[in-house]
Structure formats: C-alpha cells, structure tokens
Image (tube, rainbow, N blue to C red):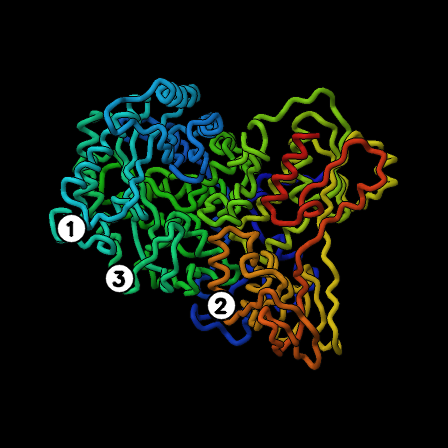
Amino acid sequence: MVKISRRDFLKGSGATALTLMAAGLVGCSAENEKTPDAPASSPAPENDKIAAAYLNPQRDDYRSNTKELKTLFSPLTIGSLQLSHRMVKSAAGSATYLAGLTDELLQYYINFAKGGVEMIYVEGIYALEIPADGSGYDAETLAFGQKLVAECAKYGASLGYQWAQFGAGENEMSVEQIQAIEDRGAQIAKGMQQLGFKAFEINAAGFNMGEHFLSRFYNVRTDEYGCTSLENRARFVTECIAKIKEACGADFNVQILIDAIEENDNVANNPTLMTLDNAVTTPRTKITTVEEGIAFAKLFEAAGADSMHLRLGPLGHHVAQFGSDLYFILNGIEGASGFGTQYDFKKHWQGQLIGDTQGAGMLLNVAARYKAAVSIPCGVVTYMDPAHAPDFFEQALEDGKADFFLMTRPLTVDTEYVNKLREGRIDEIAPCTRCLHCHIGSNEANAMAGYCRVNALTQRVMREGGPAAYELPPIEKAKKVMVIGGGPAGMEAARIAAARGHDVTLYEKKGTLGGLLDFAHTVKGPHENLQDFKNYLIRQLEITGVKVETGVEVDAAKINAEAPDAVILAAGGLRDTLQVEGDGSAPVIDMESFMFTEMGENVLIYGSNAQAFDAALWLTVHKKHVTMITPNTAAEMDMQQSQHAMRMMTTALYSLGFSAWPQASLKSVNQNKAVILTETGVEMEIACDAIVNAADMLPNTSLLEGLTVAETYAVGDCANPFNIAKAIHAGNDAGRAV
C-alpha cells in the first residue's frame, strides 16, 4: 500500500522535479529552478526560457509546516460576534442560490457549519430578501430562512448576508433615487435580522454600486455623491451603514467589502465577465490607491462599520478576488496579466503585492496597512489558505498583518476544512487546484464543464445528472470491487466505494499512482496544486482501506479469475497515431514525451484541447515558435479549461507569437516545411521542425468486452475524455452506484 506522511504532503513539486531529471529531461530546468543572480528583466544567455519567465521568481519555502496554529485558532471578536478561530466563509463560490430556496441550498451552507466554520456570509439569495412593498415575509420564506439559521447554529455557526447591489447608471441617478436604494439596503438588513442573521456585508467592490461611488474610474458626479472629496465618494456607503445600524441596532454587525488596492490590467479593452466593457476613452489612471482605501476605511469605521473585508481590485475584471490565480495560471510566465501583459509585481500595484508565493496571501502586506490605520478588525481574501502554507499564514496573523482570513474555494473544495485543520489532519484536506471552474460566468461551454474540479458534489447535488444527496448511499451488501487504473477517476471511485463499505482493490499498471497528474503538474507548473491533489487522493485510499496493487497490468483473464462483483474501469483514453505524409524531416512526438525530446525551433501542435494549449505555452516559454492546427472549430478550442483560464492562456500565447488555425488539416511535411489547408480552403506553408500530437483522446473501454462480471462501469478518459473535473465526477458517481 502506498503511504505518505503529513509532512510529505506539503513538500510540493520537488519530488516531481527530481523524477523528471532522473528520466533525462532535455532542454528545460525544473519549474522552480531560477538563476538567483540574473536580473529580473534580462536573463543570462544560458537560461532556457524567455525573459518573462524570470520576471517574478518564486520561492518554495513559504509552504513549510512547522508551527502550531495557535493564532489561527485563537478567539476573535468582530463587533458583537465571538469566534474561536480566524477563518470566515466569504460570500462567493456557488451558484446554488440561483435555483431559489431549495434543499440543496440549505444543505450547502449547513455543511460549512458542520465543518467548523463559525461565521458564514451567504451570497445573493434574492428569494430571502424581504419584499420591497412592505408586505413582510410569506410563511414559506420565513420558515426557510429561520431553518437555515437554526440548522447552522446547531454547529455553532452564525450567518451574515452579503448585499451586492450591482452598479449601473449611478451618474444619472437623482439624490432621491440613491437614498431610496440606501433605504432598501437597510430594509433588507432588517429582514435578515428577522430571520436570525447576525451580520450584513455591503459589497462595495468590483462592479457593485458602492464601488461605483467610491471609484474615480466610474464616478463622474459633481454633487454630494461625486468625486469632489473622499467624503462624498464614500457617502453612499457611510449612509448605508448608518441606516442599517439605525434599523437593526448597534449589535447587528456591518462589514464592508472594498477593493483594497486597484489597478487596471484590461489593457486590450476586452469584454469582462459581466459583458460590461470599459470605454476606450476612460482614463486608466483613475484607480483607488491603498492610501485612498485606508481613508475610506476610516470613514466607514466612523460611520459604525464593525469590520473590513479587503480584496484585490483589477478594474474591468469582475473576478477580482481571483486575481492571484489568474496572474499565476501561466506556467513559466510568473505574474502575467489576463491580457497578455507580463506584470513585474515590484512595479505594479504600488509594489504592495506579495508576488513570490504563487499568489498565496498576495494581499497580506496591503491588509497590514489597513489594520494599522483602523481599530476595527480587518479580514483579507485572495488565496487565503492556511492548509496550503501553514507557517506563512500563521506568521501573518502573529505579525498582525490581518485579523482574520476570508475564504471561499478552500472551504467549498472541502467543507470539513476547519475541523481537519484544527485536528492537524492537513493531509486529509482536499486542495483547491485553482482551476476556476467554480466561477463559470456566462460561458455556455464552461457551464457544461463547470463545478469543482476536486469536490464532485459542489453544484451537482440534487440536480439532474448529479448525486441525490451529499451523504453516501448505504450499501445492502459489501461487494468485491476491482478498480482498474490509478488516475484521478480511478482513485476517486475507489475511495468512495471503499468509504461505503465495499472491499476494493485498485490496480495500476505503472509503478506509481496518479495517472497523468505528475505530467500535468510539470506542464502546468505548481500553481494548480496537482501534486497536492494526487497526494490527497493517495492518502484517501489509505484512510478508506483500499488495497493498492501497482505495477500490475490487468487483462480480461485476470478479472475473470478474480471474479469480482463489480469492475470500475479507469484506464485512461487513447490517442490516435498521427500519420504525416512527407520526408520525415519533422518527427511526430507523443504528447506525453514532448518535454523530454530535443526538437528544433519551429514546433507544430496538432490538436486544440487544454493539453494542447498547456503544451503550447510550455514550448513558447522554452523559446519555441509554436503553431497550432486543429480540425476543431474556434469555439471548441481550449474548452476543457474555465473561461478565465482560457482567456489568460490564449491572450498570453498570442502576445508571445503563437498562432492557431482552426478547422485546418495537415497535408504534408517536407524539408521542414509543413503544408496546411486552412478553413478557407487555402494552402499555407509554415516552418516545422517537429510535430506534437495533442489530438483529442478517444474512449478506451475494450477491456470490459467479454467479461463475466455482471456489474461494470467505465469512468474518466476511458469513457468520456475531457478533463480532470469530469473524471472526478464520473469516479464519484461510479463509487456511489456500485
């Protein structure tokens, strides 16, 4: 059985780098191997990556785990609230509220309370907002809200509600209209108090109305709500605070969410998530500085605010709190903006962001300045994950950089996060892999591929095609289950089946578990935490009692000889051999081998899935000129990634000289010249020293044919090749069904 210690869990990519070096990796350094003496903007000639790859060198030591988490699990007072630890659930990361007052919505929040979260901010459940006509709650809504509060309270959790009034037309509003919205906010807060909520958060960040008044970027008014003074810009928020306190009493907590520091990285004027484009003529300099934000925080405190919620504010990027992920999602280009401009964090964001920890705790130094300036507690968001880097986040609290951490995705990935962390079970915490599928926005293709990559339940429970309940279904009789394949789908299926009480053995033909996760980690880089994910799954096999046989290739004869009650096939997909006419001057390289193979300068990638784009970026970073051709349409390209990762990837690639030809075919290669037929029917000749075969995977279920086993399942790429999220979902479903 494979074992991993809790300390080993946090060691990150070092083992992978050693493995690759031992395998004879050619033409690339380990991901975290930087040249410390090289100028940040001008790498030495012997360095094998483009200059942008050395712009923001990263460090590994921030992930150490030696401290007791004494400050993290110390008492905290926020207004009238008393908490036993410093982790608060922020109001984001779910679309459960969109369906109304459902059992799924109820259980979604109860799970956080069960897992140890003591302060939960609920997001935008408009069905819970008291009617504006003064009629009061109907019996059904009142009962639902009070039940939600009562069920969470059983586990010691209090609820807060985030009021996110989207901004639009503030500059044309009359004073009376503005004050009517303020009154409505106080009315909603009073209604939430009636339901039993203990706190109310005004979202004055991103695209919300509060931010539109605070920001010189949006606010062009010249009256008492305009930009003639900081007080006037803050007036909408301060009046909201006062009215809420008047309606609900001094003991009802009011928290203010703001962009603690802003910068506009939307240099290409791209449409944003909410399809709100920035006007080309709008000055890009009108950002809110840390100094202005602190001045606002002082005004909010004076008005009666009980706490601050501080987040990153890339103007024109609605997913502001995910900036740390977006800037580091490009392997090898550390600190790239979403629009192709490479950031040097020492020269942007007033030099205030922590830029050498893969985005973890990026805002902590900014938060420290706020905390020093006000007396109310300051919480901070943007990749706040103490389990990811225990010493780093504990030290931040010890040093007084923040009073508490606001978290979303670490908690949605593993709702038992707080309890596991309190008990020292870090290796049992499912890690967020920062894929951003959970924030799918309006992209229809991504909505189909959405949900959490790691937690197969998030946004799937009690829905068509998803599990019927969060709890595992009981078994009538323990079965002997064979799981074939030790990738994500196989390990997920095995752990679920074993957790339900089945006798499970997992077989993997390779010597190690993980499938292509090690390979994916090397291509993508450390920011997606895929090594952590692999280690978590291995640890889960151990905890649930799955027997693991590595180095064993299973065939039909072995299956029939073992005579299991059920077989779950997770053997991975197949990729067709790419046949290329010509003189052989450009070798065809398997996707799984391209990082280990010497090749010339000009590389053609055949395919346009997420693997192909990851390979394209890796090769581009390693100074190759990359052209992609694919039979797929432009709309189908890179669709396995979230829309945010897709935007990051494609814009950065094009800015670095990459080109792509959808609905094209490769006719021949002779004398290192490839002839392609474009979608317009025109032939083109391009330089080609090597071809990487990244064609879409094909199903691989032939092993199930002719078996005498009554119950069989095919999961992951062997059944429906797509991405890790789909593989995990399929494995979870099979483990529940067996």
How many residues crowd around disc 1 within 10 Å: few (fewer than 14), some, or many (20 or more)? many
Q: Which mark is residue 654?
A: 2
Q: Which mark is residue 282?
A: 3
Along the horizontal axis of the image, is 291 left or right of 110? Answer: left
Circles 1 and 2 in contact, beta carbons < 8 Å:
no
Circles 2 and 3 in contact, beta carbons < 8 Å:
no
The secondary element bearing badge 2 is classed as helix
Q: Residue 112, can we see it?
A: no
Could you give the CA–CA distance between mark 3 and mark 1, rounded to whole angstroms? Answer: 17 Å
Compared to residue 730, the image places residue 318 above or below, namely below
Residue 206 spot, x, y in % from top left: 32, 48
Quarter containing the C terminus: top right
Compared to residue 169, the image places residue 46 above or below, namely below
Q: Which mark is residue 226?
A: 1
Could you give the CA–CA distance between mark 1 and mark 2, rounded to whole angstroms? Answer: 40 Å
Given the image, on which type of amino acid does mark 2 rest?
A: Tyr
| Mark 2 or mark 3, earlier in chain | 3
Residue 596 spot, x, y in % from top left: 67, 64
